[in-house]
Image (tube, rainbow, N blue to C red):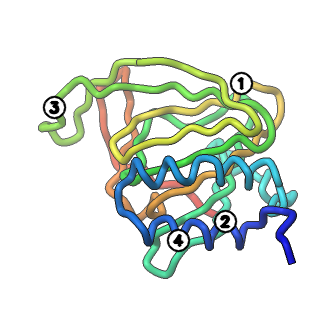
Amino acid sequence: MAVTTYELSHFVNDLRRITGETDDPRAIISALRPLARQLALAKTWLTKQHYHCDAEQGFGAHLLHEEPDHTLAVFAGAWLPGRGAPPHNHGTWAVVAGVDGDETNVFWTRVDDGSRAGYAELRKQSEKVFGPGHVVSFVPESIHSVVNATDRVTVSLHVYGKHVNYTDRFGFDPERNLAMPFKVKVD
């Protein structure tokens, strides 16, 4: 029987296969981008729960899949109107695909050498609005911020090499030149 709809279980099997063939983040990202887009547009996994946001955090992080060793984590991210996430890295490779609504990603470059604990100088590099079916990807050291500039909750699909709360990732305050550990509340 032919598969006519791309399901989360199919994506997870493809994710396992791809990461079993290589550990090169760029090769993994390249192979996953079209598959993440396909899953995001299929919306076979999307439920009303995935639109729930934590008001304090400004977004919701809904775990869809994670391997027992915390690798290969897949999330639905929901963003409150006018809210988002400050500049941050992931500490792992990442592929993000738009599902419902537009989200603005700001890409940052770290200009200091990273030698001072708790200190980081960032420079804004570019900005782009991503909508349904658009895909953005990151190597572990990439830094970006996200904002939902719309008037309704938006949703995106996030795929990580490792659950982000189990990496050495940082959130950044570019106005105060601060770098601090960055963890998210997960549903």
Residue on which the image places disc 3:
113
Q: Which residue is mark 1?
A: 149
Of mark 4 and mark 3, the one earlier in the sequence is 4
The residue tagged 2 is 11
Disc 4 on helix, strand or loop?
Answer: helix
Q: Are marks 4 and 3 in contact (CB under 8 Å)?
A: no
Q: In x, y percent, where is residue 187?
A: 66, 65
**Which quarter of the figure is the N terminus placed in?**
bottom right
Q: Position of residue 42 (x, y in %)?
A: 82, 54
- Residue depicted at 57% across the width and 29% down the height: 105
Q: Indicate whether 161 appears above or below 40.
A: below
Give the CA separation, mark 4 to mark 3: 36 Å
Q: Earlier in the sequence, mark 1 or mark 2?
A: 2
Q: Secondary structure at mark 2?
A: helix
How far apart are labels 3 and 2 at the CA level?
37 Å
Q: Determine the secondary structure under disc 3.
A: loop
Residue 38 place in picture, x, y as percent? 73, 51
Amino acid marked by disc 3: Asp
The residue at 38%/52% (across/down) is 25
Q: Amino acid at mark 1?
A: Ala
Tell me the CA gap for discs 2 and 4: 10 Å
Mark 1 or 2: the one toward you: 2
Q: Position of residue 81 (x, y in %)?
A: 75, 32
In the displayed structure, 178 sits above or below 164; it is above
User: Which numbered disc, 4 or 3, marks the residue closer to the eye?
Assistant: 4
Mark 1 and mark 3: span between their CA atoms?
32 Å
CA gap between label 1 and label 4 equals 36 Å
Q: Nearer the viewer, residue 8 or 23?
A: 23
Name the kind of residue labelled 4 in the image: Arg
Q: Of marks 1 and 3, which one's residue comes earlier in the chain?
A: 3
